[in-house]
Amino acid sequence: MNKALTRLLFGSAAFSLLIALKAIAQEGKVGLMFEGFGLNSVQLNDVEYVGECPGLQKDSVKTRFVDSQVETAPDLRVSLINKSDGVNANNPPKKDTAYKKNGTSNAFSTRTSTRGGFGVISGVNTFDYKIYNKKSKETLSEGSVQVEAQTSVTTTPRNGAWQGETLICASDSSTVQNCPDGRLILEAQKVCPDGRVLDTSTTPFRK
């Protein structure tokens, strides 16, 4: 992507963000702004792989916290905790990040999650928030917001693929160039997209 196009795309995204923030400020709202979805509403589409290379690929959405009643400042931070029924009460999804410029918190990712890293579960999520000064510890604003999350999981097969053959020497103390007769072999591996090796095939190589 050339620099001119990058600047154009970045400028467009920044302009869209500015328009959204102005609308939020005018309406006196507070909550989580999800890129591509708006305020306090998000959709996440995870992919579950089955077959030789099973796994789960989680969708993520760039997110910022906004509070039209509290101006951003260098020493401010915001703490967010998912208090919804269905999340791990001892280790709920949470986030603590800077709330210092451009009318929003720093950007972070939202995924489906019931514990630890920031995330949501399907349905209505209740988040406790607190904006505070990291130096004085003064709380400027606190409360709770509700986020509507739609989630889905698509199942798709994923299998390994054989990679090209590599010439190696079966003698640990020798290189391919000085490998003893009968010790050169061609090795191929069946590999998953994430790098997991499923199988290895070897055949003798004759000079």
Image (cartoon, rainbow, N blue to C red):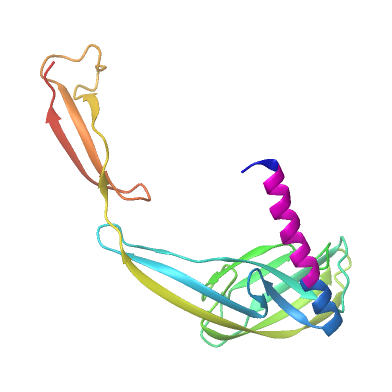
Q: Is residue 80 above or below residue 75?
A: below
- Would you say residue 98 is visible in this rendering? no
The quarter in which the C terminus is drawn is top left
Using residue 20 as the reference point, say whether residue 197 is left or right of it.
left
- The residue that appears at 17% across and 26% down in the rendered structure is 185
- The residue that appears at 83% across and 68% down in the rendered structure is 103
What is the span of residues highlighted in magenta in the rendered image?
4-19
- The residue that appears at 12% across and 14% down in the rendered structure is 181
- Judging depth in this view, the residue of 48 and 7 nearest the camera is 7
The picture places residue 91, in percent across and down from the top left corner, at 56, 74
Q: Is residue 38 above or below residue 187?
A: below
**Residue 13 on the magenta span:** yes
Q: Is residue 190 above or below residue 131?
A: above
The picture places residue 159, in percent across and down from the top left corner, at 27, 55
Magenta span: chief secondary structure: helix
The picture places residue 58, in percent across and down from the top left corner, at 47, 66
**Residue 143 on the magenta span:** no
